[in-house]
Image (cartoon, rainbow, N blue to C red):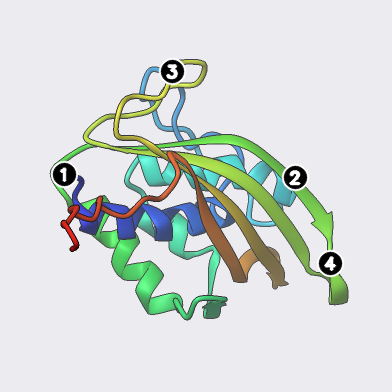
Amino acid sequence: MRDTGFRRASRLLALFAAALVGLSACDGAGERKAPPPADEDLALLIPSLVDAIQAKQPVFVMDHVAQTFKEDGGLDYYDVRALVERFAFGDGAVGARLEDSEVTPDADGKRRVSAHVAFASGQRLARGESLPEGSVVYALEVVFAKNGPRWQAVGGRYKRVSPPATSPATPSTETR
């Protein structure tokens, strides 16, 4: 049975992952690197945000989420912050890996990031390795806007794509 708290958290993290990516915050050996400059290209920021989730760097992640953030399903800045902090301050490892991403211009100078992000509880996710059992992949679409020199997530949506979301089987009952 999967931890429903983890599933809810992974959905929120998936949404944020697209908002939090850029140059690697961690290299393959776990050595910390400096985050990209705040005015760095958004396409470089996206991988850094995902890596910051895995490296448990909540300040870097939340610096790239606008306080006015509102997700299509109703999640706001404080919901995202609670989720990010839950993983960052928890005992277990958090796996987060950017599978792909694309940045496209949107209205009013905003940018739309479409990405697939994989998450796993209890273990880190390395590039190029198979996803472990129990991992999930989310398709994210996050809208970013410039706030001074920094890109910040202002809205978006997410959808679980792998494994497909399922409900527990309904027990069969005999009818007469």
Residue 146 in percent (x, y) is at 72, 69
Q: Earlier in the sequence, mark 2 or mark 1?
A: 1
What's under tag 2, amino acid-wise? Glu
Residue 64 in percent (x, y) is at 54, 63
Residue assigned mark 1: 1
Q: Given contact means CB atoms under 8 Å apart, are the residues at marks 2 and 1 in contact? A: no
Q: Earlier in the sequence, mark 1 or mark 4?
A: 1
The secondary element bearing badge 2 is classed as strand
Q: Residue at x 37, y 78 (%)?
A: 78
Q: Which mark is residue 130?
A: 3
The secondary element bearing badge 3 is classed as loop
Q: Nearer the viewer, mark 3 or mark 1?
A: 1
Q: Residue at x 32, y 46 (%)?
A: 56
Residue 55 seen in the current view: yes
Seen from the viewer's position, the closer of residues 171 and 122 is: 171
Pointer 3 local density, CA inside 10 Å: few below 14, some 14–19, many at least 20: few
What's under tag 1, amino acid-wise? Met
Tell me if 43 is positioned left or right of 73 in this view.
right
Give me the C-alpha separation between circle 3 and circle 2. Answer: 22 Å
Give me the C-alpha separation between circle 3 and circle 1. Answer: 22 Å
Residue 48 in percent (x, y) is at 54, 42
Q: Earlier in the sequence, mark 3 or mark 1?
A: 1
Give me the C-alpha separation between circle 3 and circle 4. Answer: 34 Å
Pointer 4 local density, CA inside 10 Å: few below 14, some 14–19, many at least 20: few
Q: Nearer the viewer, mark 3 or mark 2?
A: 3
Q: Quadrant of residue 26?
A: top left
Give me the C-alpha separation between circle 1 and circle 4. Answer: 40 Å
Residue assigned mark 2: 102
The secondary element bearing badge 4 is classed as loop
Residue assigned mark 4: 106
Seen from the viewer's position, the closer of residues 35 and 155 is: 155
103, above or below 94, in the image: below
